[in-house]
Image: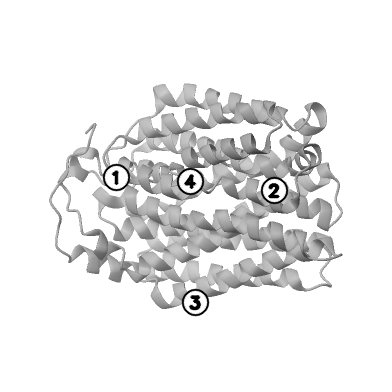
Amino acid sequence: MTTQPQGWTAWRIVALLAFLNLVNFLDKVVIGLVAVPMMDELKIAPAQFGIIGGCFFWGFAVAGIVGGFVADRVKAKWMIAAMALCWAVLQIPIAYTSSIGAVIACRFLLGVTEGPNWPVSIHALYKWFPDRMRSLPVFALGLGGSIGLMTAGIIIPLVTATWGWRANFVLLGMIGMAWLLFWLPLGKEGPIDSSREVGSAERKPHRLIFTDPTLWSCIFTHFACYWSIALTVTWTTVYLQKGLGYDALTAGRMFSLNVALSMMLSLAITWLSQRLMQRNVPSRISRGLVTAIAAVLAACCFASMMISEIPAFVRVVLIGLGGGFAQTILYTGPAIVGEIAPAPQRASILAVDNSLASLAGIIAPIATGYLVQYSGIDPAAGYEAAFAMTGALFAVASAACFAFLHPLKSSRRIQAGAALPQTRVIGG
């Protein structure tokens, strides 16, 4: 089996998939950045907008699981191409409709087609890098999303101010089609865990894998992370404007500053984790305890939003720091899953992890909408209660990580289990 990184070709695939994730996050966050003019024009109440924000995740989880199991058996290149095409096409109707139902339908279908993206993209990257080198390529994938959020915070308010909020959806459709034109000739399957090798590797019973405490610790921490992401992309810019009093352009810049802070912090933590792995520090420490400590710090940052004396700018910084600590699991989690899951089942296990975690994306925007709508005379109180709720989730997640996150122990347990019959990989 090939176990060596594949040089510039591998990093070209990283760059392409990172840019795809940039597009993915532009698609996610645009609805939050145009929230105020959209709510005003279409007469949408906060609770209704919470449904619009959450509907993206209604089919996201199921589609992610289905897509993961499909990716165990077909080439990732064509799955990724099909997803990108759907994303581009689904932006266009939103630009021309005044129907709340049509917006909900398009966002729902966008969520269905984006559901498999993260696990399938990670699965594709893992075909180019061995275990000890996987954290930074996955971080690069996440970095694309962070750059997408920063870019969105600057560009989308400017596009809205110049051409109106609807123009953003036309622009996103064009960007998606442009990416696809690069991916079709340049996208390739990696030689590590290639289809022929994966087809001959041992598959283990899913009941053995899904009763593992390490996996469930990852899933719950990932759930808390998704809660924070859904809250950020749907409600943060609204909070900055209606809760803290910033104008639309300043709120966009503050949002970008927030994302930049999260990105730099996530880079530092991911570098530390991979550096420890390369120095042969056990994954219990280099991945497990790093994740647990980051979850504790995320809990502290988000919970402190309830302290009334904190100035507005400090609140922006706390949200950014909390996001950076929260997103640690996005980079250590897939590496842990890759460590414990058999290669032929890796895509499906990553998909189940991502899909169960993404259920937070359904709940968080709606819960926040109700907290805001019924928070009383203080417009900031509902948003800050939502951040505190996120802190509580991370407090529970950190306890689970400290207690149960033992990747090597779980890997040995799963590998010791009885093997399933081999299955053929389509396109191998």
Of tags 4 and 1, the one toward the viewer is 4
Q: Which residue is mark 1?
A: 4
Asked if the residue under mark 3 is in contact with the one under mark 2, i.e. CB atoms within 8 Å, the reply is: no
Q: Residues within 10 Å of mark 1 (few under 14, many from 20)?
A: few
Mark 2 vs mark 3, CA separation in Å: 33 Å
Residue ID at (75%, 39%): 38
Q: Which residue is mark 3?
A: 399
Mark 4 vs mark 1, CA separation in Å: 37 Å
- Three-letter code, disc 2: Phe
Of tags 3 and 1, the one toward the viewer is 3
Left/right placement of residue 39 relative to residue 427 reads right
Q: Nearer the viewer, residue 67 or 24?
A: 67
Mark 4 vs mark 2, CA separation in Å: 18 Å
Q: Secondary structure at mark 4?
A: loop
- Could you tell which of marks 4 and 2 lies nearer the N-terminus? 2
Q: Which mark is residue 59?
A: 4
Q: Which residue is mark 2?
A: 49
Mark 3 vs mark 4, CA separation in Å: 30 Å
Does residue 383 appear anywhere in the picture? no
